[in-house]
Each structure stands twice: as C-alpha cells, then as structure tokens.
Image (cartoon, grey):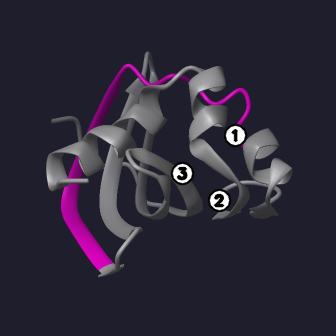
Amino acid sequence: MDDQRVWDFEQGLWQASEERYHERVDPECVMALSHEPFLVHGQGAVDAVSGTPEWDDVSFSDKIISRPEEGLIVVGYRVSAEKGETRFDAACTSVYRRKAHEDWSVVQHAQVALPAVESR
C-alpha cells in the first residue's frame, strides 16, 4: 500500500460508518484509548469505539509511516477531529497487517488525548 492509500485508509477509519469500521478492525486488535476502558482487545476493541462520532473534519499532522517487514505497516500522527462543537486532538499510532492482496486490517491502535489547540 503506497503512502497516500495508507493515509486514506487511516482517515477512513475516523470518518467511517460503524459498520465499515468494524470491517477494518482485526479480530485480534489491541487498542489503548484515552477513555474508559482504556485498554481493549478483540471484540472489546470494536465495542469500545461503537458510538464514536463519524467526524465531519479530520486532519493529520506530524505523519510517520514505517514498514518494518512485508505485510506490516506502522503509522504515527497527530489528529484533530471535529463534529459540530465537539473537537478531539490526539497523538495516535496504528498498525496494519495484510491478510491478503489489498486486504488490510488494523491490529493495533493507540490514542493519547492532547489539549485542544486554538481554532485554525
């Protein structure tokens, strides 16, 4: 997956419907979140983000991509997401594994909430 597709995939997770999100999260995913229950695995990871807003506006900065081996992609970035009056800023990492040609899933995601910054 080239860099643009990686960022499109990640942004798609922030703006996906709940059904689409569930399709992209691996059954063995481990997540560290900025809210209860903080650390989740497998179905708990999917359940923990159920009800998360489909953000209207999402922007990434400080983007990093690493490919430590074939079929494994690691990303790190800062995100600013908005929906109406709600804003969320965080430092994040995600790890994708290739299950088959052009079939990727998230096996790890972590978020560290950051203080909100002034409006752009």
Q: Specify few, some or many for label 2: CA neighbours under 10 Å numbering under 14, 14-19, or 20 or more.
A: some
Residue 24 quadrant: top right
Q: Which of the two discs, 1 and 3, labels the residue nearer the N terminus?
A: 1
Q: Nearer the viewer, residue 66 or 72?
A: 72
On residue 33, the disc is 2
Which range is magenta? 49-67
Give percent across and percent down for residue 43.
83, 48
Q: Which residue is mark 1?
A: 49
Q: Which residue is mark 3?
A: 105
Closest to the camera, between mark 3 and mark 2, is 3
Residue 11 quadrant: top left
Give percent across and percent down for residue 68.
33, 84
Q: Is residue 51 magenta?
A: yes
Q: Is residue 5 magenta?
A: no
Q: Residue at x 28, y 50 (%)?
A: 6
**Element at label 2:** loop
Residue 3 quadrant: bottom left
Residue 87 appears anywhere in the view: no
Q: Tell me: 3 left or right of 103.
A: left
- How many numbered discs? 3
Give percent across and percent down for residue 34.
63, 58
Query: From what the image shows, is residue 65 above or below residue 8?
Result: below
